[in-house]
Amino acid sequence: MDKVGYLRDLLAELREQGLYNTIRHIDSPQGPWLVVDGKRVLNFCSNNYLGLASDPRLVSAAKAALGRYGIGPGAVRTIAGTMTIHDELEEKLARFKGVEAAISFQAGFVANAGTIPALVGDGDVIVTDELNHASIIDGVRLSKASRKIYRHCDVDDLAAKLAEARAEGARRILVITDGVFSMDGDIAPLDRIVETADAYEAMVMVDDAHGEGVLGKGGRGIVDHFGLHGRVEVEVGTMSKAFGVVGGYVAGPAPVVEWLRQRSRPFLFSSAVTPPDVAACIASVEILDASTELVDRLWSNAAWFKERMAAAGFDLGLSQTPITPVMLGDEQTAQEFSRRLFDDEAVFAQAIAYPTVPLGKARIRVMISAAHSREDLEYGAEAFLRVGRSLGVVS
Ligand SMILES: *Cc1c(COP(=O)(O)O)cnc(C)c1O
């Protein structure tokens, strides 16, 4: 009896449609250059915005914690007691973000999935941007609140949906948006979103996964970028991107965080990340807190690369951040472009196509990092130009 035959069929279908995800294998630390499938390549793929993923200061903090606390967290924090190192991370994060309190989770994904259903339920309405991250979508699905989807970053449409929700007698309303949208690199108009939400007495939740360590003073995130301190109820963050480690968190007013400690299911029913991870996260927050140097370098790298690519004739779409989509349109062109970059130029840059982005909007997404040297960026831009010319994308 073949009970999983249907999966074999579905996998074959994915392969036929060109939608099968092939995962490459990395055999080096994260950095501007990687060893991928045995080949040394320039890294234009990772979310390691500040180069912290292999920073020796994080590594030694993790080693020290390993010596002091061992490797495992033992159990769920609410049942067996929390390690003080987790408390320390939460206090440092709250101070860094300029909020009353913070709670850490196992991942950014988990923070979204565990927060949304804890805050709103039956009788409530969630109003959510159509391009929000999968973990927000899943969090919304886990909640018993009803949902309304507004057009991407369209504040007028948001206002219309909020008016509808009020007319229908919603008890509580939660507006949710990504801070920086990861496929286009555009920034949500959070100032106008908050203003609009205020008019309807709706709470605002922003997922700042690609904004932390990038936007705001020294990388304090999108709320700091817009000067909205105290006006956003929930800031979700990840420790896995600019912070260079792993884990997620929610920052906000004390009652939000206190409630999540009582009712967020991943906090209550899943173990915390390990002490060395937490120690590395603390070191990372301290580095950002002490100096804006890495964040400044990230932005100057991004500005240099984008200017160079635009001058060469590439279309960089809507990007306002170091996420640099090189718009190619056609799915096959994007796949071939990425393959030639890897095989002929030793540049690792991922093609992103339908269904992650709409049909006909395929692109190569270049992730710029503070860890790239000017020579690295020059090398990458030259490679793009050669492949772009060979494929007739630029002249
Ligand atoms: C990456 C990402 C997450 C998930 O973060 P992890 O810590 O990797 O689970 C959540 N939301 C957004 C917008 C992201 O880009």
Image: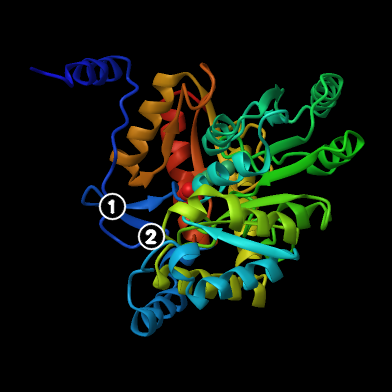
In the depicted structure, whether residue 37 falls above or below residue 291 = above
* Mark 2 touches mark 1? (CB < 8 Å): yes
Distance from the alpha carbon under mark 2 to that under mark 1: 9 Å
In the depicted structure, whether residue 222 falls above or below residue 355 = below
The label shown at residue 26 is 1
Residue 247 vs residue 234: left or right?
left
Of the pair 384 and 281, the residue shown nearer to us:
281
x, y (%) of residue 334?
A: 43, 26
Residue 335 vs residue 369: left or right?
left
x, y (%) of residue 280?
A: 46, 72
The residue that appears at 82% across and 26% down in the rendered structure is 162
Residue 350 vs residue 155: left or right?
left
User: How many other residues sit within 10 Å of disc 1, few (<14), some (14-19) or many (≥20)?
Assistant: some
x, y (%) of residue 352?
A: 46, 31
User: How many other residues sit within 10 Å of disc 2, few (<14), some (14-19) or many (≥20)?
Assistant: some
Type of the residue with mark 2 = Gln
The label shown at residue 194 is none
Tell me the quarter of the image containing the N terminus: top left
Outermost residue, right direction? 199
Outermost residue, left direction? 1
Residue 159 vs residue 302: left or right?
right
x, y (%) of residue 89?
A: 56, 71
Q: Secondary structure at mark 1?
A: loop
Q: Secondary structure at mark 2?
A: loop
- Residue 116 position by quadrant: top right
Q: Is mark 1 within 8 Å of ligand 1?
A: no
Instruction: Identify residue for label 2.
Output: 30
- Residue 104 position by quadrant: bottom right
The residue that appears at 57% across and 40% down in the rendered structure is 182
